[in-house]
Amino acid sequence: MKFINDILKIITEYGSSYLTGAGNTLLLALIGTVIGCIIGFAVGTVQATPLPEKGGKRVLMRIVRGILRGYVEIFRGTPMIVQAVFIHYGMFYMGLKPAIWFSGILVVSINTGAYMAETVRGGIMSIDQGQFEGAKAIGMTHNQTMINVILPQALRNIIPQIGNNFIINVKDTAVMSIIAFMDLFSIHKSVVGSNYLYFPSAVLTMAIYLTMTLVSSVLLRWWEDKMAGDANYDIVNTKDTLAQTSGLYRAKKKEAKR
């Protein structure tokens, strides 16, 4: 069959190139997602921080929030492909000579950070207000409360969205071909430019993208389950003699039988 022969021909002649492109795609998506999450946590935390009651700090906080809000709206409201052209060729226009990898990571990170900022802000706001008040009651500062109490819970709540952003980045990095980044889609365009086998190459490229996203989904679900922990905790080995008599102890085996 001609289709099968064309697929085998592409794999034989350009298989290593497709693998290189897939590797570049995964690496760019991973680095961009990690840096984007760091940006998102920083921006989202600032946006969720209560304003001081009065004084210069309140004015300064409003200005900072306005700038961060503008960043979020701009990068959520424009396509990544336009952002790539704007940032990469904009740096050239200003006399800089950025490497392709630098521009690619910068674009994906900033774009992801804008989306993660709103996710983090929502995750923080979803935490019960009583936990803020409880931490304050035992003498914890706002920073201590955020680091030790609120952000760990917010992180667990938004893990699905982090995974979703990673999978989106795996697919959306295809737009980096506009700045000559050699991702999987760029390899596809190079191959069809030399042999004109558009459809067989497209099928192979889609299969590779699908494999990457499916495997990523499985790994992310496993990570999510690990982060969630057990529904009930066996504290039979605790030294607290009041633990079992207080009714806090529930053995996992007992819960499983119910």
Image (cartoon, helix red, strand yellow):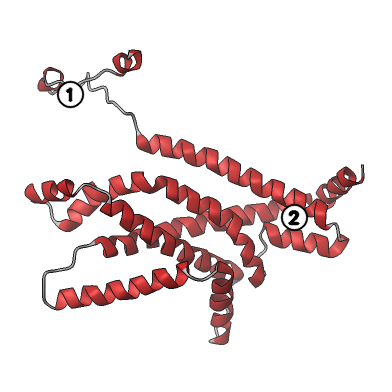
Q: Residue 37, position in %: x, y?
A: 41, 57
Marking on residue 17: 2
Specify whether 41 is left or right of 163: left
- The quadrant in which residue 79 appears is bottom right
Residue 213 lies, with reference to residue 59, above or below; the image says above
> Residue under circle 1?
248
Give the amino acid at mark 2.
Answer: Ser
Give the amino acid at mark 1.
Answer: Leu
For label 2, the crowd category at 10 Å Cα-Cα, with few meaning under 14, some 14 to 19 and many 20 or more, is: some
Residue at image position (55%, 82%) is 90
Specify whether 216 is left or right of 43: right
The number of discs equals 2
For the C terminus, the image quarter is: top left
- State if disc 1 and disc 2 touch (CB < 8 Å): no
Q: Say which label, 2 or 1, has the lower sequence index.
A: 2
Residue 156 lies, with reference to residue 236, above or below; the image says below
Residue 63 lies, with reference to residue 120, above or below; the image says below
* Residue 75 or residue 222, whichever sits in front: 75
Residue at image position (21%, 77%) is 60
- Residue lying furthest bottom: 94
Specify whether 197 is left or right of 94: right
Q: Residue 100, position in %: x, y?
A: 60, 70
Specify whether 224 is left or right of 233: right
Q: Residue 177, position in %: x, y?
A: 66, 67
Residue at image position (59%, 80%) is 89
For the N terminus, the image quarter is: top right
* Residue 162 or residue 70, whichever sits in front: 70
